[in-house]
Amino acid sequence: MRHRTGHSRKAAPMTTWHDWAEKIDEQIWHIEGEPHVQQLRDLWHAFNTDPRTKITMWGVFNSGKSSLIRRLLAEDGTPVPESVRAGADRTQYETHVVASGDVDYIDTPGLDSGAPEHDRRADAAAALTDVLVVVTTPLLRQAEVRRITRMLTRSGHRYPDGSLHIVVNQLDEAGVDPRSDLAAYQELKETKRQTVVNALRAAGISEALPPVHTVCADAWRINSRRASPVAANYDASRSFDSITEFVAALHAGIHHRTPLRHASAVRHWTRAAQDAIDSAESQLAAQRELLESADDARRRIGVWREKLTAVAAACEARLRTIVHRELRAVMLAAERPSSDSDGARLQTALTTWHTQSLHELAQLASQFDADTDFGSAGRGSVSDSLAGTLDSVRSLGAAPRADLSSPMSSPTITRLVTLSDAAGPALRKSFESSFGFTVDRAASLIAGYDEAVGHIATDQRSGVFAILNRASTSGMPQFDRERLMSIPGTGPLMAYLERNPELGDPDNAAKIARRLKLTNRAAAAAPIVVGGIVEVARIMSENAHAQRTVQANAERDRMLAQLVDDVVAAETGAAGSTSPWITALNQVRAALDTHTASDDDRKKTAARIQVLLAAAEALSRLLAQPPR
Ligand SMILES: Nc1nc2c(ncn2[C@@H]2O[C@H](COP(=O)(O)OP(=O)(O)OP(=O)(O)O)[C@@H](O)[C@H]2O)c(=O)[nH]1
Ligand SMILES: [Mg+2]
């Protein structure tokens, strides 16, 4: 909350500047934050609660500010303190306050001495004063005029009568010695005064031009080294140095202090607003640069992402080709009765694919890592965040290479693959066309068969089966029949096989049982290991081969496509897959995401830009409509 002044809020002009200052305060807060605004409030409060009238000397170094204060103190009869010294050197870097009666004279560091901090201090003091005395010399240079104009402008030109004096000092050194020709000296004084007035007018300080005094604070520097000069010490120049007139004008202007204080408030907050606008501009430049480089990074990350997608797509396409080729080989082998292809080739192919693909991924990650621009742009986090990923990708990439001969670690092998729903019905149909009866019928047939077999002792079964298998192709000779009768528990089995000729012999029954188990597992969407997939492929192929129908072939091809999809999905995209490929791919993706996750930062930057723009604009508007 803003500090209230001692004046009643009901006083109309007070309310006006007060509300205005509060609005300025609010906008500066957006740009500079609380501590800065609090400092401004404190400064104002300290100034405004001080009942003493502040008269501040301000001007370029060596113009005679300190000498003028020494003179004013001497004229007031106030002892001159040690701190207020006149010198040929720029020795003053601090602001000194010297009390004299109910007035405070404020001596500020000289301007344009090459220390911006001094200028800043002097300008700050100049804004918070009842009366500003701009001290200059007849040598008034263009740069000095610009300096004065700028300071007045940045304070909002708010200088009511009595609050601003321009003192042209050191007139005794302007070219004419007043002791030899007073008239010529007075003429020169007036000429110099006009020169200064014209220069200020030309610089735009035309309306309400403040009084311009031509004086000698310390003619011939007589008192510059005196520790504590008194009025009498200046008697030699009193007749022409115009200090008496200046003192009179100075004191006449400070009788009504309220308008002076209001003007001070306007100047203080105007100057603060100008500073804040400048600060907003430099902050805006920085924020925009931030935004640009963020956008640039985002574009380039986009390119990397596309590269990653391309690598992933190429690898996955290659996997599809490999799996298709291998499963097709399994199927074709199945159609040649002697062949005994298994999942080994598929496993090897998958291992090789992993090795190659991870290598490609690691390469891409390295290239990304080596994209030095990301590091040099001050966003080292890219490389940092990738480093871990790279390591793990590299180790993942290396592992299959090292383990090429050892058992495959691919999820298709180590984990179970779930056949999609489509496989179930297809397998059931395939079962029916293979055996001529339904899966359900097979289930009850096999159940009865198992029950019948159960009557035979385990160690006798293979002998019994051999006889029965032989019999199904060449009939059963008498001695075989007799042997069977001699083995306990064969009766029920023989009877069962005779009652259910679909079962054929025990070999066929075992085949039916195996297919039944597989089909049921697939139908229930149960997991099937890669061996299972190979087996399914073989069965489909055998079936198509046996039937030699277009329909059976189409079914086989459909099934092949289905199996390829399942394997590829397991390796590259099945939910929850722990395939090294998926893990590595996700890690690289995550690294890219981490870098682009600056989306929030970008939003913050964009929002900050809006805040700065709005606040700077609001301040400009407030400055254009200062309180009356
Ligand atoms: N001849 C002459 N010299 C003066 C007059 N007033 C000041 N000087 C001299 O000018 C030099 C600078 O005076 P200062 O009072 O130190 O000037 P300043 O503006 O306070 O200087 P900084 O504190 O460095 O900014 C000193 O040598 C003074 O003696 C004057 O009226 N006439
Ligand atoms: Mg000084």
Image (cartoon, rainbow, N blue to C red):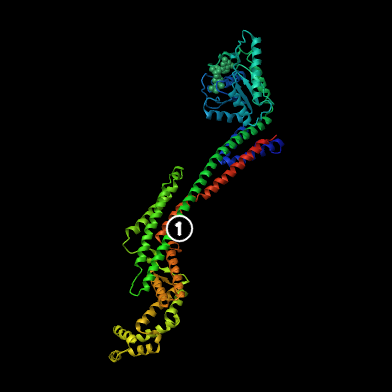
| SS under mark 1 | helix
Amino acid type for the residue under numbered disc 1: Ala
Residue at 37%, 58% (x, y): give it.
355
Residue nearest the observer in this picture, 559 or 262: 559
Left or right: where 447 falls relative to 215: left
Residue nearest the observer in this picture, 604 or 403: 403
In the rendered image, residue 580, in percent from the top left (x then y), is placed at 39, 59
In the rendered image, residue 87, in percent from the top left (x then y), is placed at 52, 19
Residue nearest the observer in this picture, 120 or 544: 544
Left or right: where 610 falls relative to 407: right
Quarter holding the N terminus is top right
Q: In this view, does 319 lie above or below 232?
A: below
Q: Can residue 348 be seen in this view?
A: yes
In the rendered image, residue 151, in percent from the top left (x then y), is placed at 61, 29
Residue nearest the observer in this picture, 66 or 288: 288
Q: For label 1, count other residues whose C-alpha is less than 10 Å away and answer few (under 14), some (14-19) or many (20+).
A: few
Q: In this view, does 60 lie above or below 447?
A: above
Quarter holding the C terminus is top right
User: Dividing the picture into quarters, in which one does residue 109 lie?
Assistant: top right
The residue pinned by badge 1 equals 313
Q: Is residue 389 above or below residue 168?
A: below
In this rendering, the count of numbered labels is 1
User: Dividing the picture into quarters, in which one does residue 336 lie?
Assistant: bottom left
Q: Can residue 454 be seen in this view?
A: no
Q: Is mark 1 within 8 Å of ligand 1?
A: no
In the rendered image, residue 314, in percent from the top left (x then y), is placed at 44, 57
